[in-house]
Amino acid sequence: MYIIVGLGNPEKKYDNTRHNVGFITIDKIAQKYGIDIVERKFKAMVGRGVIEGQKVVLVKPLTYMNLSGESVREVVDYFKVDGQTEVCIIYDDTSMDVGKIRIRKKGSAGGHNGIKSIISHLGSDTFVRVKVGIGEKPAKFDLADYVLGHFTEEERSAIDETADKVCEAVKLLVWGEPDEAMNRFNG
């Protein structure tokens, strides 16, 4: 069993915002593998399915970004998975250009409040994460306003292409091959 969590904020007004790149990517994974995310459980929207022969649970927390760890903890406990090797978190990163991917097996929150919450609730910073670049905040721009801002058409096109790449990386991750995923997709 492998848990794949996309971070975002649950209200309609946050659709297509930079901070919701995790939700956008989870939706793409669900579409590609025919997984319906319709179950409301664990303070999240959840879909169960199979990717490359491996059972997976796709998760979109409904707790808002800063409390994402609450939902992740409930999912990990319920399915009795190893939070360090059977969980992947997909989220936005302002330190990378739009559409870039960086996969890591551990690390700090790097100022991301959703990751900070997950680290706190799991009691560890060791879990696979897929960071999706949303571009650096422009000078004199408030960070919250930037990450809660909507993608331009050009940026959204790049994010859609990136979501396709993350789908390919997920194939390796569910088979327990994060090193291979990092070699192929970190750029």
Image (cartoon, grey):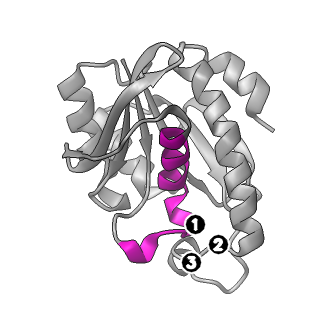
Q: How many marks?
A: 3
Q: Amino acid at mark 2?
A: Phe
Q: Quadrant of the N terminus?
A: top left
Query: Which residue is at a point 32% across and 62% down the rendered structure image?
Result: 64
Tell me where residue 136 appears, x and y as whole percent: 71, 67
As for residue 14 lying within the magenta part, the answer is yes
> Relative to residue 179, is residue 16 drawn left or right?
left
Instruction: Give the mark, 2 or 1, whose residue is nearer the N terminus.
Output: 1
Gap in Å between the C-alphas at discs 3 and 1? 6 Å
Mark number, residue 149: 3
- Type of amino acid at the residue the image marks with label 3: Gly
Residue 18's mark?
1
The secondary structure type at the circle numbered 3 is: loop
Label 1 crowd (10 A; few <14 / some 14-19 / many >=20)? many
| 94 displayed left or right of 119 | right
Q: Contact, CB < 8 Å: mark 3 with mark 1?
A: yes
Q: Give the percent coordinates (x, y) of residue 60.
A: 36, 49
Q: Secondary structure at mark 2?
A: loop
On the rendered structure, is 38 left or right of 101?
A: left
Query: Residue under circle 2?
Result: 151
Give above or below for 156 relative to 35: below
Quadrant in the picture for the C terminus = top right
